[in-house]
Image (cartoon, grey):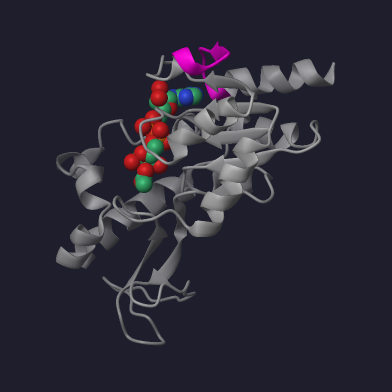
């Protein structure tokens, strides 16, 4: 199996999805404007405030039944490759091993010049790289930036070599992640989607489970264990 997850699988953990309206004071900002290298260049302090707000939401969140069911599913099939567009780390906290983080991780800081991941305990508006002094940035992929090469290669290979591809909680609007299902289909995999709403690509799937990941995934796992 190859599984792609999006923000929808964390919705039941009260982590807002991308296309939900931003909340509170961030309502006036568009994530597509904020999550960009240009926005960081223009106002790193604003970016850090936004990411610290998102970190607080995620730190207060708990994995939900959908995350736990996926972790259990990995033990019920010969091989499961989990690719997530999410940066919240909830799959790992639910026990999923070797999660491919297609868009990076909210809690990994990296040097904005060298790209290296930097551990630090700086509680300042804009933390600085201890090696070169440049601004540190959150280790997430911004719009217009490339997907980490290793994540891209492993995900494409897994999509091309699976019997079943499961797309969960994603609007399938952002490529190249949204193209993984096409790769799987081109390699004769059975392709399914779990989403309470119909996405624009539902017609391409063999099966569409119209429901919440936190409901559908545990039922799937139960059907495999009876
Ligand atoms: P979106 O917010 O675009 O889509 C979330 C999807 O989850 C929607 O299709 C919802 O219908 C669905 N959904 C909501 N609640 C659900 C539930 N309980 N169970 C299952 N599905 C549910 O988020 P993504 O598709 O993840 O990219 O967005 C993909 C990428 O677009 C993000 O990674 C981000 C954004 O631009 C970057 O940051 C580079």
Q: Residue at x 44, y 34 (%)?
A: 178
Provide residue 194's location: percent of width, then percent of height: 53, 20
Residue at the extreme right: 226
Give the image quarter of residue 137.
bottom left
Provide residue 186's location: percent of width, then percent of height: 57, 27
Q: Which stretch did the figure color magenta?
A: 203-213
Provide residue 25's location: percent of width, then percent of height: 19, 44
Left/right placement of residue 215 relative to residue 53 reads: right
Left/right placement of residue 150 relative to residue 201 reads: right
Where 221 falls versus 137 (above or below)?
A: above
Q: Quadrant of the C terminus?
A: top right
Q: Residue 106 or 53: which is nearer the viewer?
A: 106
Q: Residue 116 or 28: which is nearer the viewer?
A: 116
Q: Is residue 211 highlighted in magenta?
A: yes
Q: Residue at x 67, y 26 (%)?
A: 164
Q: Residue at x 62, y 47 (%)?
A: 93
Left/right placement of residue 167 relative to residue 23 reads: right
Where 154 falls versus 159 (above or below)?
A: below
Q: Is residue 102 highlighted in magenta?
A: no
Where 192 falls versus 149 (above or below)?
A: above
Q: Residue 181 or 166: which is nearer the viewer?
A: 181
Q: Confirm whether residue 126 shows in the render.
A: yes
């Amino acid at each position: 199996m190859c599984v792609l997850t999006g923000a929808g699988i964390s919705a039941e953990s009260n982590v807002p999805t991308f296309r939900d309206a931003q909340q509170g004071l961030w309502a006036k900002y568009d994530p597509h404007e904020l999550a960009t290298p240009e926005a960081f260049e223009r106002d790193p302090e604003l970016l850090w405030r936004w990411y610290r707000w998102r970190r607080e939401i995620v730190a207060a969140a708990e994995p939900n039944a959908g995350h736990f069911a996926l972790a259990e599913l990995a033990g019920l099939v010969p091989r499961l490759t989990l690719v997530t567009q999410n940066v919240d780390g909830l799959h790992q906290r639910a026990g999923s091993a070797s999660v491919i983080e297609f868009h990076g991780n909210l809690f990994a800081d990296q040097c904005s010049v060298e790209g290296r991941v930097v551990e630090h305990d700086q509680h300042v508006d804009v933390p600085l790289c201890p090696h070169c002094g440049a601004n540190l940035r959150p280790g997430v992929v911004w719009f217009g930036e490339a997907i980490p090469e290793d994540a891209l290669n492993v995900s494409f290979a897994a999509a091309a070599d699976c019997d079943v591809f499961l797309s969960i909680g994603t609007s399938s609007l952002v490529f190249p992640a949204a193209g993984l299902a096409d790769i799987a289909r081109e390699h004769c995999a059975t392709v399914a989607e779990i989403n309470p709403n119909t996405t624009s690509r539902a017609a391409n799937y063999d099966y569409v489970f119209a429901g919440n990941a936190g409901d559908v995934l545990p039922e799937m796992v139960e059907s495999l264990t009876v």
